[in-house]
Image: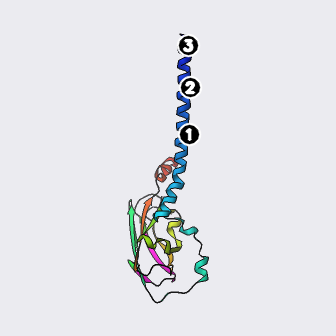
Amino acid sequence: MATEQTERLKLNRALLVKLLIIAVVMLGFGYALVPVYRQMCEVLGINNLSQQEGNFVEYDKNTQVDKTRSITVELDGNAQGPWRFRPTTRSVTVHPGELTTVMYEVVNTQNRTVQAQAIPSYAPQSATPHFKKVECFCFQQQTMKANEARQMPVVFFIDPKLPREVKTITLSYTFFEIAGTQAVAAARQ
């Protein structure tokens, strides 16, 4: 009887050790997902918010605008939630190297304050590294008061190294409420 209890105790301890190891591995995997996700997004050119950290020294050295060609930048806005979100202009024609400002308009149609974020995407994907944003509302979260309307700028230039076959670039934003902010606001009340 005593040996059976000791045997059971050993098995329980072994199971506990295995479960603890699994829990630690799962926790480590969860923490590793964030940098892996960021790296994948950077490589694929999607959800790329890190352009604000870019080095614009190269642009400062060569301020020449390439007037020999024009690029059409089509603007698009998508809203996830009860917003009105759209560009104020559907497209602009720019020369590579030319600093350009476009505006997006967002209206919070809710009767409460919300926090939101915009995620950019580019098409064709080959244009992504050449689309340089100097200022953008997508660089940070936006706090929108109840029924607030706001116009937000995007200041950008197209790197003159953009391949010549690219004549049109689509800049699209998806504007969405940051998950959990509604629950936090309700908890505060």
The residue lying at 52 percent from left, 19 percent from top is: 8
Reply yes or no: does residue 44 show up in magenta.
no
Task: Pick whichever, 73 or 38, lies toward us.
Answer: 38
Q: Secondary structure at mark 2?
A: helix
Q: Residues within 10 Å of mark 3 (few under 14, many from 20)?
A: few
Q: Which mark is on residue 13?
A: 2
Real-space Cα distance between discs 3 and 1? 32 Å
Report which residue position mark 3 lands on.
Answer: 3
Question: Measured from the top left, where is residue 187 in percent x and y?
Answer: 50, 47
Task: Determine the main secondary structure of the stretch shown in magenta.
Answer: strand
The answer to whether residue 73 is above or below residue 22 is below
Q: Are marks 1 and 2 in contact (CB under 8 Å)?
A: no
Q: Quadrant of residue 50?
A: bottom right
At label 3, the amino acid type is Thr
Image x and y of residue 71, in percent: 42, 82
- Specify the segment rendered in magenta: 92-105
Q: Identify residue type, mark 2.
A: Arg
Q: Which residue is mark 1?
A: 24
